[in-house]
């Protein structure tokens, strides 16, 4: 079973027939739409957000076709599928081999590449500084990364030898702190003095991984390192410097930002619909997106407290996020109100 097949089956299990296969496509590619963002949170799939931008519709459809032929999934309607018993058993067996620990595409998709570019260039430059080598081709071409590096080297109080040793021990300590990541996934990519790092394809072949599996493992190592360094900056002063000015981009889509500004000015949903000439469902999607991402945002103006309590009570008792099931039990709520409550109060408490 291929790695990409495992991920898609996992997503189908989480979606439980409530979304089409193309919601998975948009999720893995990281489409910044209200629907995709809501799906990622509602179905507890934020770890996979934008983890595989090269994914094509053709690849996705080929996986679905194979899964049908192998009786891993069964057709529901309108490009929606459910796992069969065979598919569920296969997924469970594979989950023992494949872990998603540390993967957090939603939180780190906008900074992990920059972190990697800075780290790889810093290691190359420091390595050559230690050996007093000045003639080499920089492994990274991004001008902003070069500007950052020059500033870092200029302002560090450490001499070249101490800088090299400190960087080595920080990276070693960081990578050895977790049992379920393979440091070689990252190490084999590094370039230094008289040493050219392998490409991602070369490392995948070297480690006996398929390309998608390697891509995912590499992202997992980067996300692990970022989280580790963020939570213990004193332990990793050099590595934390790589993240110092890297900020996660605003999680709200541009259109939702405009709606949020109007909400903050006291406009109702119907007034925003008229002012923006958009569908009511679109504005409702924006409100749900705001509830997902703005901690202090109150949903009280959009749904009565009593209805909120009924939805929460049923969700916690039934341990479900299925909108249709919730709607059948809380008939006084509409789908927008249900999505809004799920968005505001998160999924962790009833997972």
Image (spheres, grey):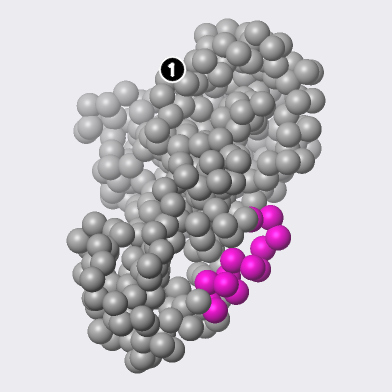
Query: Is residue 281 something that shows in the picture?
Result: yes
The residue under the point 59% across, 66% down is: 175
Compared with 164, 212 (above or below) is above
Instruction: Please state the horizontal and vertical placement of residue 303, each as a whole percent of the image.
Output: 52, 38
Label 1 neighbour load within 10 Å: few <14, some 14-19, many 20+: few
Which residue lies most toward the front here? 194
Location of residue 163 by image quarter: bottom left
Between residue 320 and residue 278, name the one nearer to us. Answer: 320
The residues colored magenta run 169-181
Q: Residue at x 28, y 42 (%)?
A: 254
> From the viewer's perspective, is residue 164 above or below residue 286?
below
- Quick one: 220 or 322, which is closer to the camera? 220
Q: Residue at x 78, y 37 (%)?
A: 317
Q: Is residue 271 magenta?
A: no
- What residue sits right under mark 1 in the picture? 58
Identify which residue, 143 or 231, lies in the foreground: 143
Report the quarter where the C terminus lies.
Answer: top right
Residue 11 visible in the picture: no
Q: Secondary structure at mark 1?
A: helix
């Amino acid at each position: 079973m291929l790695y990409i097949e495992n991920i898609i089956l996992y997503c189908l299990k989480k979606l439980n027939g409530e979304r089409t296969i193309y919601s998975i496509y948009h999720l893995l590619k990281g489409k910044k739409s209200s629907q995709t963002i809501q799906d990622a949170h509602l179905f507890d799939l934020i770890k996979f957000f934008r983890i595989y931008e090269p994914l094509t519709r053709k690849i996705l459809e080929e996986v679905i076709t194979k899964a049908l032929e192998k009786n891993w999934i069964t057709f529901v309607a309108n490009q929606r599928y459910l796992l069969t018993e065979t598919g569920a058993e296969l997924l469970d067996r594979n989950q023992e081999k494949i872990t998603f620990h540390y993967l957090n595409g939603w939180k780190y998709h906008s900074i992990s590449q920059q972190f990697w570019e800075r780290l790889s260039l810093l290691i190359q430059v420091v390595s050559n500084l230690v050996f007093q080598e000045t003639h080499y081709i920089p492994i990274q071409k991004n001008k902003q990364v070069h500007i950052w590096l020059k500033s870092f080297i200029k302002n560090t109080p450490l001499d070249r030898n101490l800088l090299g040793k400190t960087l080595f021990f920080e990276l070693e300590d960081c990578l050895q702190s977790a049992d379920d990541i393979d440091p070689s996934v990252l190490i084999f990519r590094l370039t230094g003095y008289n040493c050219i790092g392998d490409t991602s394809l070369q490392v995948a072949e070297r480690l006996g991984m398929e390309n998608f599996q390697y891509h995912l493992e590499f992202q997992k190592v980067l996300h692990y390192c970022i989280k580790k360094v963020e939570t213990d900056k004193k332990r990793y002063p050099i590595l934390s410097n790589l993240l110092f000015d890297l900020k996660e981009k605003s999680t709200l889509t541009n259109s939702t930002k405009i709606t949020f500004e109007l909400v903050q000015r006291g406009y109702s949903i119907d007034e925003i619909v008229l002012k923006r000439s958009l569908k009511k469902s679109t504005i409702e999607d924006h409100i749900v997106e705001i509830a997902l991402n703005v901690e202090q945002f109150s949903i009280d103006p959009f749904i009565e407290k009593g209805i909120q309590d009924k939805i929460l009570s049923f969700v916690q008792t039934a341990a479900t996020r299925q909108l249709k099931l919730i709607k059948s039990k809380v008939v006084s709520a509409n789908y927008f109100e249900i999505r809004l409550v799920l968005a505001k109060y998160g999924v962790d408490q009833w997972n």
